[in-house]
Image (cartoon, coloured by chain):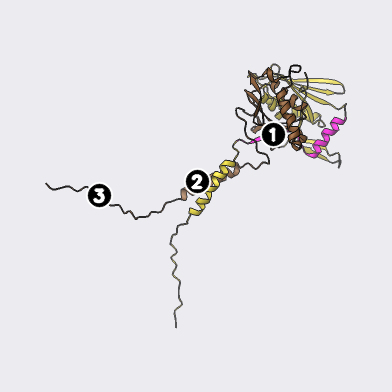
Chain colours: A yellow, B brown
Amino acid sequence: MGRRFKLLIDRNAEFELDLAPLLAVMVKLVPVLLLSSAFVQMMIIETDLPQVVQEAIKKQEADPNAASISVAVTTKEGVKITLTEKGKAHIEVVGLGQDKQIDYPALHAKFVELKKSHPAIFKIDIQPDEDVAYKDVVKVMDEARKARAKDLKFPVKDEKSGKESTTEYMFPEIVFGNTMDG
Amino acid sequence: MPTRTRFKVPVKRSQSFGLNITSMTDMFTILLVFLLQSFAAGEVQIDPAEGVRLPQSMTEKNPVDGARVSVSAKEIKFDQKVVALIKDNKIDSAALDAHDNQFIKPLFDELKKLNTENEKLAKTGKVLLQADQDLPYATLRKIMYTASMAGFPNLKLVTTVGN
């Protein structure tokens, strides 16, 4: 009776993986990616909005008696928010902090409060003073555009379907109101 | 006198050795992952303008194409061409119109030229503005005013990602 042939396998044997081709690919890929990488990520501020919000802005523009908000940014007094409703102007001021800088958390809270009381307003006018730094204008726009709290949503009505929906945007369309002034 | 022979280190010149590249591969893998993450996949590539420190913003909108205007503390550029000089945060009076001090004539001319050269881009009316964060609004207002007069009212403010 013949004995069955047994393949001799050394289970403790070690082998070395040839990483040279992998390394060669990486050496070529790294310079390509280095050249096309953007280390400073740049974004833009514009007014491209979801459809429902855009329709709400059109509705606001179509009604001349609708409430409107104007934001004046000054280096001496801080930010002056003027809410004009039914011909009456209601002014609120967010002053400067101890470091002579605009109190941004207080400003954001004021915008949230305004949005809660006037959910139909999506467009505001911003009127910075001549000596206000560009970075401060951008910060004020940031505070007005979107709610910082993730769970904070505002009601918005879809004019086409009539359905109520929510948005995290507060005042997404910001217009420089004093650009064309002399 | 017996001569002394110099000691020779026994070197096998035909000897080969295996280079351990495992750690190098590890390093490249990490580098590759990092680079893939920061790979710019946007439709429009904006080159940072020289001498311009952009403000930070929370906006999440990727850049779009438009007329490119950059403003540093020293000059206003349209694409790469210097159109006006700035000194002490004020635009050089030579670049301003004599009857309207908000109007930057050389910038207006360049934007008007773009209207004929690149009609498709001009129709969008978009201006990509890269401005230094410390510039006063008065300087920017003149650029906005001029761009608006030249038929570019859609202002896109370029910012860096921040909190």
Residue that badge 1 annotates: A44
Q: Nearer the viewer, mark 2 or mark 1?
A: 1
Amino acid carrying label 3: it is: Lys
Q: Nearer the viewer, mark 3 or mark 1?
A: 3
**Quick check: A181 above or below B25?**
above
**Depth check, front residue: A106 or A24:** A24
Give percent across and percent down for residue A167. 77, 37
Question: Circle 2 marks a residue in which chain?
Answer: B
Are labels 3 and 1 assigned to the same chain? no
Is A116 on the left or on the right of A36, as rendered?
Answer: right
Amino acid carrying label 1: it is: Ile
Q: Which residues are magenta?
A: A40-63
Question: Circle 1 marks a residue in which chain?
Answer: A
**Depth check, front residue: B27 or A27:** A27
Give percent across and percent down for residue B22. 46, 50
Amino acid carrying label 2: it is: Met
Kindly state the secondary structure of the residue where label 3 is placed.
loop
Q: Measure how far apart labels 2 and 1 are at the Cα level.
A: 34 Å
Name the residue at 44% across, 70% down: A8
Name the residue at 65% across, 43% down: B41
Give residue B8's mark. Answer: 3
Quarter of the picture containing the N terminus of chain A is: bottom left
